Amino acid sequence: MVFQGKDDPAMVVWDRAQTPSKDVRIFNLNEPPMIPPTPVCKGWKKPLNDFIKINVYAIVLNGYVGYGDIARDTDGLVLAGCYGFAIKALDAIWAELEALTMGLNLASKLNALKLIMESDSATLINTVKKRDQDVTILGRCVKKESMALRNFELVHFNWIDRSNNEAADLLCKLTFKNKCNLFFNLDYPSEIHNVIIRDAIK
């Protein structure tokens, strides 16, 4: 029998296999993480002073399309909103674009000057931000719809997580429930009351 010393390459490999290296401790759940998780702010955020924030959302389901848009001020109070229902086959991104157009029309009715538009569609927000360079059909349509931006002094487009777009999401669900269109001012549907109050008191 041949005994091998601790400097033997085979023994070194065996030792390292038995004892995970501290270099990869980041993957060890028993050790504190080397890179702490980045805190993420959950929930809808109130807009800055002088801004109106409009959240838009769309759902496509079995040949039906639902839209939901809601405008709120710096206190989180509802200024106006709408939801819409349509029977047509449509890809989700095109439905999101139509919801955005509805949101811009809503802002025009409110005579808003400074506007924040929020959607949980990353494709839509990225296309809007790069509309001058996007030569796709979607990009051309977004650029055409964006002509309405000339009606405002300043407009920001933000992507948000779906969980932060809850009020507009609920309006879409109401659309499918009621199968109709609705425009409202301060007298928003009671089904979104709890979400509105929760966002306003944060």
Image: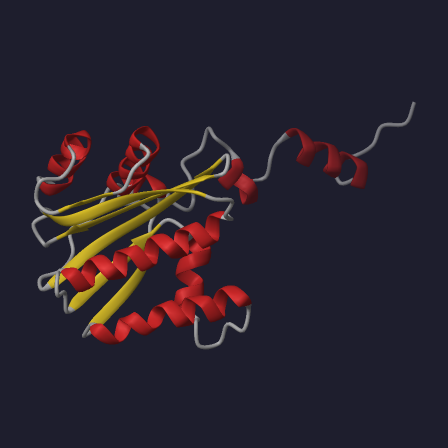
- Regarding residue 76, the answer to whether it shows in the image is yes
Picture coordinates of residue 9, whole percent (x, y): 79, 41
The answer to whether 143 is drawn above or below residue 21 in the figure is below
Q: Check the image and name the residue furthest to the top.
A: 1
**Image quadrant for the C terminus?**
top left
Q: Is residue 1 left or right of residue 176?
A: right
Residue at the image position 55 percent from the left and 68 percent from the top: 136
Residue at the image position 60 percent from the left and 34 percent from the top: 20
Displayed quadrant of residue 172: top left
Residue at the image position 15 percent from the left and 40 percent from the top: 199
Q: Nearer the viewer, residue 39 or 162?
A: 162
Q: Is residue 44 left or right of residue 33?
A: left
Q: Nearer the viewer, residue 93 or 6?
A: 93
Q: Nearer the viewer, residue 4 or 169?
A: 169
- Regarding residue 159, the answer to whether it shows in the image is no
What colour scheme has been applied to the protein in the rendered image?
A: secondary structure
Q: Nearer the viewer, residue 191 or 123?
A: 191
The answer to whether 153 is drawn above or below residue 183 in the figure is below
Q: Is residue 40 left or right of residue 59?
A: left
Q: Check the image and name the residue furthest to the right.
A: 1
**Image quadrant for the N terminus?**
top right
Picture coordinates of residue 33, whole percent (x, y): 42, 39
Picture coordinates of residue 25, whole percent (x, y): 51, 39
Picture coordinates of residue 2, whole percent (x, y): 90, 27
